[in-house]
Amino acid sequence: MKVYQLFLLFLLALFTQPSLSKAIDINILVEDGYFPIVIDAQTQRGLAPEFIKILNDSQSEFNFILNSLPVKRLSKSVEQGHFDVLFLMALQWIPQSMRSNVMQSSFYMITKNELYALKENAINQAYFNDLRALTKVGVLGYSYHFAGYNTDAYYLSEEHSVSLTIDEYNVVKMLLLKRANIGVLNSIAYQYFKDQKAFDMSLLYKSEIPDAVFDTHFLVNTQQSKISASKIDAILNSSAIKFQIKSLLNKYGVSSSFNIE
């Protein structure tokens, strides 16, 4: 009888133990050098690593793993479906063939591609009227509305007189060195450079009409069953994390769906 009672107690203890199941690994891809304020792959600093740290510190169900890839490897991974989630990207930035295989979070971050020229060259807004007549500098892998979101380097060079560089630091440098008439800068990068006094941004003149405005979401691969877009939104909207995310975005001068509620 005692053995039977001990066995029952063992079963009771076994099934009343708190769950010790391992957190589910979620592979999140981000472009290496994206802005590069979003991520500096060498130092693992920037908005993306800080964002993922907040996600991991706030819950134990998922282990979000941030992987930064060069643009060509990222594109290949997306085309082959080798990812769980893409970090805050616009649908326009991924191959058309993959768009039906992703679900976007309700949460989004707002970014703009803005056009800048040297003030000494641009007397007024009319300077931006004929973009085809102006040489331009942008970032390799970025999508530009004036080029129909075609990211092919040869096409951009031949059809739109665009020189491509690795990041937005070099866009500003080339513009200041007069190696292009127009520089295409993300609004987040511009504000960051201005706040950090990385360059004298007062030397630049901005077009009142941006090249494009994007709502960037977490894009979830629907071919995997680890996590859903609605689950990501539930985590972001939880009281344990929402204030932290708002503070992080304010730190980087980023507008989001949290700012316009």
Image (cartoon, grey):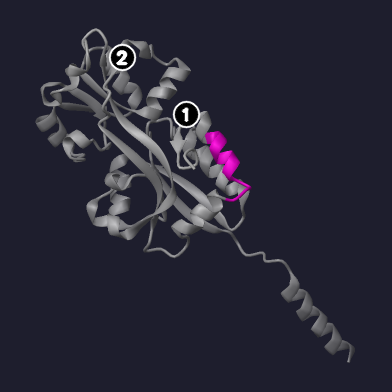
The reply, left or right, for residue 261 in relation to residue 221 is right
Secondary element under disc 1, as helix, strand or loop, is: loop
Label 1, residues with CA under 10 Å away: few <14, some 14-19, many ≥20: some
Residue located beneath label 2 in the image: 204
In percent of width and height, residue 260 lies at 47, 39
The reply, left or right, for residue 60 in relation to residue 90 is right
246 part of magenta stretch: yes
Which image quadrant for residue 42? top left
Mark on residue 253? 1
Q: Which residues are magenta?
A: 238-248
The residue at the far front in this view is: 261
Label the magenta part by its dominant secondary structure.
Answer: helix
In percent of width and height, residue 86 lies at 39, 49
Residues 224 and 149: in front is 149
The reply, left or right, for residue 241 in relation to residue 155 is right
Q: Residue at x 25, y 31 (%)?
A: 211
The residue at the far bottom in this view is: 1
72 up-or-down from 82: above or below: above
Say which label, 1 or 2, has the lower sequence index. 2
Label 2, residues with CA under 10 Å away: few <14, some 14-19, many ≥20: some
Residues 196 and 76: in front is 196
76 up-or-down from 176: above or below: below
Disc 1 marks a residue whose amino acid type is Gly
The reply, left or right, for residue 250 in relation to residue 119 is right
